[in-house]
Image: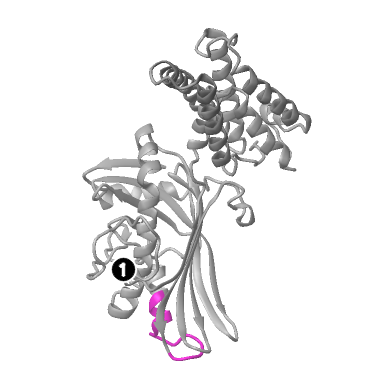
Amino acid sequence: MIEWRWLSGWTDEELAPRLAAARSLSRNFEAASGEMTLEGGWNQVHSVSSLGREPPGPPVADGLFARAKGGLETFDFSDPRIVRWHFNADSPLHGRTVLLELKSLAQRLRFLCAVRVGDTREEHGETCSVYGFSFETLGRHIEEGREWFLLRKSHETGEVRFHIEAAWRPGKFPNLWSRVGFTLVGRRYQRAWHRLTHARLRALTLHHPELAGRPAEQGKVDHSGHELEGLGPVRFFAQRAPGRLKSQLEEEVEAVQRGHWLTPIGLGVMAGMRSMSAPALVSHRLAESPEPRTDPLSVALSKPWVPRVLEVLTLGELVGDKLPTTPARVKLVPMTGRIFMGAVAAATSVSGQTRKRRVLAAALGGLAAAASTWTFYSLRKMATTRFRVPSMAAAFAEDALVAAIASRLMPLVSNRPAEA
């Protein structure tokens, strides 16, 4: 499920039936934890902070570990200015369904999505104690993935640390503008939320122990989000650095699939400049991977001999481009070929994605190839006629630009097997 509203949220009377309906939803992804890797298309986030210390040994009653545990169970670690959790506190934590109210644009735009507590951990060993849970996205959530929240106490030192481990990728969006908006600012909101989560749990357990373990509001539906002072405004830092927002971050690692839709566009731009360069690049990357393919385009381009043939054709095109008898690239046949090559390369570059995303990638690649064809034809003509740049020099400059784009796209081109 996913809903959105502008300038207002949802009342308890509206949330209660939605929460009941969400209990029947299943996960919106199938991957197991071991399969949710960066190479498999999943973004990774890992962060650790120190909450403080309590007496050495196992967790003590009403100690720091116990208070932090209460803050986790009521989801009060989440800053309500970005994400507020709606749930029933009487239901068992394991398997508990929760509605997330995601807020953006100074809390004016709100989305309602469902998650479920998938697994819980409570371990008391000789050297440390661990408590936490994971939540998994359900139904038509704007993200797909799993996130772990874990407390760990060292029995030797008494130090309590808070860990967040997340694996996610974009999910379903109610419309095109929300997908574009998420692409532009979504990761900044995610980063701000993760930092505030560490800061908030630390403030909650150290300075507001009376609030830990009880919902902020109760009624037909319970809600997270006690009002806490001293956390400051929601900030969107351009750089990741520990120690800000009083979160005492000791470690923060983010590994994301950057340029997800820039890759098809970049391949289209390459095809508009040198038509065979884009499929040659993608074919080379596919042939390197030992993983089997299922979609016909990927199967064809991944055959060992195909990259060699395409490389020869690319070299031939580089020579032919500089011959005076070569027809202008903006004529119907050459331009159609460039658009086709851009679409093919773009579609196979996201071979691990759904068919809908491959079609969208092909459209982006084709459009980018058309725009690139006209743009670089015009630039080259202007350079040689208006600025008197030698034709051969302009051609080699364009070759160098194609090589530079290829070097940047090489690590981003997917070599994952296609999904069924």
114 vs 321, nearest the viewer: 321
In the image, what residue occupies the spot 39% across and 38% down?
179
142 vs 358, nearest the viewer: 358
Is residue 87 at all visible to an observer of this figure?
no
Residue 29 in the image: state x and y as whole percent: 55, 46
In the image, what residue occupies the spot 39% across and 54% down?
190
Image position of 92 (left or right of 418): left
State the image quarter where residue 354 is shown.
top right
In the image, what residue occupies the spot 50% across and 28% down?
269
Image position of 287 (left or right of 98): right
In the rendered image, the vertical position of residue 414 relative to residue 82, given as above or below:
above
Q: Which residue is mark 1?
A: 245
In the rendered image, the vertical position of residue 285 relative to residue 335, given as above or below:
below
Q: Estimate how packed mark 1 is, as few (under 14), some (14 to 19) or many (20 or more) residues with alpha carbons within 10 Å.
A: some
Stretch of the chain drawn in magenta: 55-68
- Check the picture and name the quadrant holding the N terminus: top left
In the image, what residue occupies the spot 47% across and 25% down?
368
SS class, disc 1: helix
In the rendered image, the vertical position of residue 22 relative to residue 378, given as above or below:
below
332 vs 78, nearest the viewer: 332
- Check the picture and name the quadrant holding the C terminus: top right
Residue 23 in the image: state x and y as whole percent: 46, 50
User: Which amino acid type corresponds to the residue marked 1 in the rendered image?
Assistant: Leu
Q: Main secondary structure of the magenta part?
A: loop
State the image quarter where residue 297 is shown.
top right
Residue 225 in the image: state x and y as whole percent: 29, 63
Residue 63: within the magenta? yes
In the rendered image, the vertical position of residue 411 relative to residue 97, given as above or below:
above
Is residue 90 at all visible to an observer of this figure?
yes
